[in-house]
Amino acid sequence: MKSQDVDESIAILIKGNPECISDDELMKTADRVLDEAAERLTGVRVD
């Protein structure tokens, strides 16, 4: 991120290996990441 001059405050850490979790857990993770990304980019919390 530093080499691309990207602000670290927009980084989202996704824990776990998507190849090793169930489809249900993968969808829950995707939903969480999408909500967090939208909040960080817009400053508006999505519930």
Image: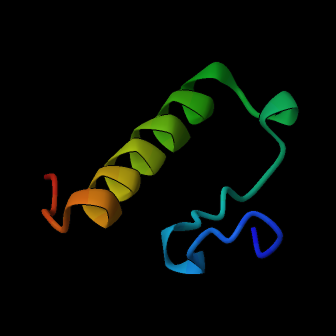
Please give the name of the residue rendered at 31% of the width and 59% of the height, measured from the top-left corner.
41
Q: How is the image coloured?
A: rainbow
Please determine whether, in this image, residue 22 is positioned above or below residue 34. above
- Could you say which is closer to the camera, residue 17 or residue 12? 12
Please give the name of the residue rendered at 83% of the width and 70% of the height, measured from the top-left corner.
3
From the viewer's perspective, is 3 left or right of 12? right
Q: Residue furthest top?
A: 23
- Could you say which is closer to the camera, residue 21 or residue 45? 45
How many numbered markers are drawn?
A: 0
Please give the name of the residue rendered at 13% of the width and 63% of the height, measured from the top-left corner.
44
**Residue 10: x %, y % from top left:** 49, 68
**Residue 31: x %, y % from top left:** 40, 38
Instruction: Please identify the quarter of the rendering in which residue 11 is found.
Output: bottom right
**Residue 47: x %, y % from top left:** 13, 52
Please determine whether, in this image, residue 23 is positioned above or below residue 12. above
From the viewer's perspective, is 21 left or right of 11? right
Please give the name of the residue rendered at 68% of the width and 71% of the height, measured from the top-left corner.
5
Quadrant into which the N terminus falls: bottom right
Please determine whether, in this image, residue 23 is positioned above or below residue 42. above
From the viewer's perspective, is 44 left or right of 12? left
